[in-house]
Image (cartoon, rainbow, N blue to C red):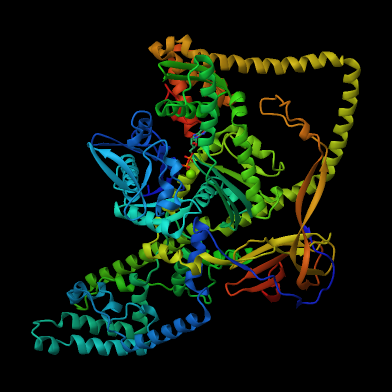
Amino acid sequence: MIVLPAGQAETSAKAQVTAPIRRPIEPVGRFFLSHATRTLRGHTWSEYEKIEAEKNVQQIETNEDEDLGDEEQSEDLLAHDPRDWKTADLYAVLGLSHLRWRATEDQIRRAHRKQVLKHHPDKKSASGGLDQDGFFKIIQKAFEVMLDSTKRLQFDSVDEGADVLPPTPKSKYDFFEAWAPVFESESRFSKKKPVPSLGTLESSKDEVDKFYSFWGKFDSWKTFEFKDEDVPDDTANRDHKRYIERKNVAARKKLKQEDNKRVIDLVERAYSEDPRIKMFKEAAKKEKEQKKWEREAGSRKAAEEAAAKKAAEEEAAKKAAEEAAASKVNSKKAKEAAKNAKKKQKRAIRGCGKDSDYFGDAGKSADIDADLDMIVDKLDDLQLASVAGKVADKSAAKAAIEEAVSELSGASKLDKSLLKYFN
Amino acid sequence: MSTIIGISFGNTSSSIAVADNEGKVEVIANPDGDRSIPSVLSYIGEDEYHGQQARAQLIRNSDNTIINFRDFIGKQFEEVNGELTKDGSKVVKTEDGKCGFKVKIDDKEEILSIGEVTKRHLKQLKLAAEDYIGKVVEGCVITVPTDFNDAQRQELTNLSNEIGLKVHQLINEPSAALLSYLTNNEEEYLKDQIFAVADFGGVRTDGAIVSVRGGIMTILTTLHDHSLGGDSFDSSLMEFFAKDFEKKFKVDPRKNKRSLAKLKNEAITVKKTLSNVQTSSVSIESLAEGFDYQSSINRLRYELTIRSTLAKTTSFVEKLIEKAKLLPSEINKVLLVGGSSNTPKLSSELSSIFPPSTEIISPALDSKALLPNELVCRGAALQAALIESFDEDEVKESLQPIVVNTQHLVNSIGIKSSEGKFIPILVNETAYPIKKSIEVTNGSSESVSIEFYEGKKIVKETILEPVKQVYSDGEEFSDDSDEEEEPEIIKEAVEECGTLLGSLSLKDLKPDSKLEIIINITQDGKLHLSSRELKIGSVATKVELSFK
Ligand SMILES: Nc1ncnc2c1ncn2[C@@H]1O[C@H](COP(=O)(O)OP(=O)(O)O)[C@@H](O)[C@H]1O
Ligand SMILES: [Mg+2]
């Protein structure tokens, strides 16, 4: 590693950096696309434009508050069966689907007032609608739930409209961009606060470890009363009542377990995809190897010395014992043998057309030989041996060459269009 | 699989490819089985021929065969080099002063405008792609040479859009080639490197010096030679055959257009064969006055025949590097592109002007390298697959000048090591905003100084003893060995600490602590230099700088 010089330099800026040059970058590749996204999401526009944009945002925010609850409800929602009000999207009912659990009590009241004015049965029947108080009933129910903090928490627990789904596996996404909102959304259910955030690629190992250990032990206040089956409140049939109550408790427990499992799965998946975890594992592995290497340095050195000594002795003995010339001849022979084997394999492949009567295509013998010539030159040593082995069987020769050709052209080593027969 | 395809549209040949999300690319063969599809159209009767089938018509039906038209797109007739079309239908001036081609279709003389020709060619490519994919292809990414001007780019885009092949993006050929190399060699993508991309095509040669920093490519210089390419190799070989034929039969085969076309056809076949094997037969039926030409040629003979053109290819690359004010040793990799780069001798000759540290990427030197004539269309297909997941407006927005025109560092910025060496953190030509960090240590010192410098390039010279140039097959050329006797001077660029920009220090350190140094340049040109100990709770020290 690079070592810094000793010293106590003062913290100071000494000079300006040479003026940069503006140049176009090539708009290709995924790193360009990230650059474009980064640039377009903010930092580039001139200061003026930035201020303008900020002004706009503020304006929109105040305006938004003015038309709070002006959201239009969908046809489906308007026709929702009031007896089934629990399955309706209660925030959408109040025109608050963009705020949901973030809506303040004041916002809820104001939105409710608007809905009442808009959907009051009197008004509806005046404008010709008959029997239109179904949705109004749902509005009143929603208001009731939202103003009761316990009930509201119960509804928020099962408010699917507020869920941020994890990225679909196998799709392409940036880990942090895709997962941060998921954890952010999930963290509103945490009993413990503050909840650590996902962080960035630069987060330290400690931060990352803390994050996962927190989520591994995630303790959520989510409850599932909202999904309860209604308990009959007639006192006559107490057995039936108790039966429903027990069923509800069991169902809640099951839902809770399922939800815990869902969070665990989520965390596990994120962990397995987290690029930082991979980085840390690599780093740890390297460090371990380095330590091992250092630990063994002593014994290794001794062993090396012993080995070197032994080798030197042996070398001397060998020299004395053997004729240098003889050993030379030997090694030459081995090389020669390998070379001969290769030559032989090449010859076998080149000749395999002829040897197998040109696969019954004797008219094309010249093309076949020319192709074989070209193919042989493209094969590496391993392929040579394998193909030569295969063509020894004359009936399999053609198939073996075809297989080699498709392997070579698949690896872009051979331009198939140059072949005359095996193309 | 993507339904946006990548198209490389050359004067000589075109290729189409398609990629999937995982970056696997398929170069598409047309119904004739060609992956390198000649950019040629030919007319017989009422039928239109395309690709290799059209090119074959140059022998019998050259007047109705349109070749080498790509560079004419969006140009005035006076601006183009009509010589390029002398072997086929000659380019003519149309009423609007642009280019056109006179051909006979269904016995009627017609002038096809360059726009019409281009559309017909693109239509054929679209059909070939659809035939292969089995789905309608509606969009594409097309590559163009870096010297295609704005009018040409606009014109090509319009033409393609008109035939229902929407152009999502036009990209530069060298960048496409590089994208395909980097995607295929993922470990190289994030290294800071300088590439020389040399594209040896059919009738032109194009070069670009491209810096790659953090996966972002910037073209530093380009160079073009519109008289150098595979056609020059063909001509040398044709001349060699013609001389031989003349000697044997006392007949000059250069007098007749058809004989010349036959010579050219065989020259191309032989040339391509010799890129793969050591010898090739030569056989032309009835070359002139009824005489057949039969012969054979080996690679060494061929390489001698094309020596002067080979020398031009090498000096083209030398000029390219000079134009970028760089030394050969500053080029990390040379990426060989284009059909003519298949010539083995071309890469081996090129390697002689570079030190061993420069890697030349070509199949002749590395059997794992992608085919040079497929690099460009592969890159286009990769880009097509990348932008497919974005909507049109996002892609358009990302091509705005505000995104594309980016500030680049002129000098590297780095620190000084305890040995006084300059350690770059951000290298020159890095586009910003950017953030980068390195890990260092204090060694045994309790406190360290971190001094940030701009790098200063200096050129070191080493004198090498003469080495004899040996040719690939081990033989030595005897006739020019004299000039190699002189000692060679190797120039090498190194960076030293230049201007001191700022300093920081870290104190109270345990021996061998891990330290991190971070440089961050924001969009608005503020440099934040900081350093910290890599342990929990450590506080970073910081300095802020600005540009002149
Ligand atoms: N295997 C090969 N060996 C040598 N030259 C080749 C080979 N394949 C193609 N060529 C030559 O490459 C040139 C075409 O290159 P290409 O990159 O397709 O051209 P362009 O992009 O200019 O249309 C032609 O001259 C052709 O003969
Ligand atoms: Mg080209």
Residue B528 vs A370, above or below: the answer is below
* Quadrant (top left/top right/bottom left/bottom right) for the C terminus of chain B: bottom right
The one of B1 and A389 positioned closer to us in this rendering: B1
Q: Is residue A298 left or right of residue A259?
A: right
In which quadrant of the rendered view does residue A125 lie?
Answer: bottom left
Q: Is any atom of residue A237 visible in this view? A: no
Instruction: Give how far across and how far down residue A328 sits, in percent.
Output: 81, 17
Q: Residue at x 40, y 68 (%)?
A: A164
Q: Residue at x 40, y 51 (%)?
A: B77
Q: Is any atom of residue B106 visible in this view? A: yes
Instruction: Give how far across and how far down residue B63 sits, in percent.
Output: 34, 35
Q: Residue at x 36, y 81 (%)?
A: A150
Q: Residue at x 46, y 20 (%)?
A: A400
Q: Is residue A72 left or right of residue B406?
A: left
Instruction: Give how far across and how far down residue A397 sits, in percent.
Output: 46, 16
In which quadrant of the rendered view does residue A108 lie?
Answer: bottom left
